[in-house]
Image (cartoon, grey):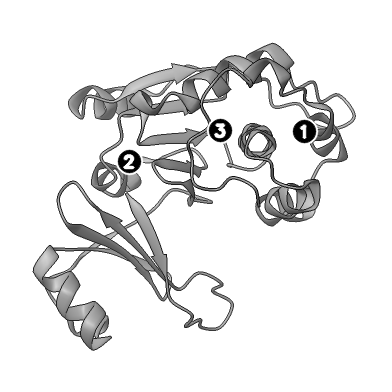
Amino acid sequence: MKVQKSTSKCGDCTNCRTIFIDENNNNMLLHHHHQWRLLSSEDSNNNTNNNNVDDDLEAQFFVPPLNFSMVDNGVFRSGFPEPANFSFLQSLGLRSIIYLCPEPYPEANLEFIKTNGIKLYQFGIEGHKEPFVNIPDDTIREALKVLLDARNHPVLIHCKRGKHRTGCLVGCLRKLQKWCLSSIFDEYQRFAAAKARVSDQRFIELFDTSSFKHLPISLSGSNR
């Protein structure tokens, strides 16, 4: 899946015209004015050429999980998916989910991933508040190995709110992609907002990427 972005914005929506194009089935996921739609290839061509997405009465609306965003080609992040989000997630064609909480996956979610052939990788990181935060280095490393394996893509990373544990894993991925720390922290803070943790950012800053040098880093967001 590749992404295109237009420049139009509305109100407080900073991402109101984002287009995700699924190269496998030629469908389009369109985020437009706080709503998501799935368009067929024919409708996608008509709407992108005519800039008239609101007139498409056949489009199916979806509800993304809390804090959903695209990290890179085939890599997504979010808060905990609810049943109302399942149709949206199904449209992504996920192969795997990286779940960063210790609690058991709910039965409804287990049924969803079983029905859709999605593999669940659970890395139980406790959700403590500062000053008692302890991000386990070895657990993040194991999750990164799963994340970097293209055979697991498309993949969704999520914790409870998609802020701290997810933010730490994505931040460490960005270090592997050679992002500068200021850009890594900007992205982390965009999701964590007022609840950004100094301890999380310190963990990302000190994370040693040398053990991953032998692994291919083929994602598109490198060297930012």
**Mark 3 closeness class: few <14, some 14–19, many ≥20 residues within 10 Å:** many
- Name which of mark 1 and mark 3 comes first in the sequence: 3
- Disc on res. 89: none
- For discs 2 and 3, the disc positioned in front in the rendered view: 3
In this view, 83 is above or below 132: below
- Disc on res. 83: 2
Q: Is 178 or 140 nearer to us in this picture?
A: 178
- Name which of mark 1 and mark 2 comes first in the sequence: 2
Q: Using the numbered discs, state the Cα–Cα distance from disc 2 to disc 3 in whole angstroms.
A: 16 Å
Q: Which residue is mark 3?
A: 159
Check disc 3 and report its element: helix, strand or loop: loop
| Amino acid of disc 2 | Pro
Q: Which residue is mark 1?
A: 204
In this view, 13 is above or below 37: below
- Name which of mark 2 and mark 3 comes first in the sequence: 2
The residue shown at (43%, 23%) is 149
The residue shown at (49%, 27%) is 147
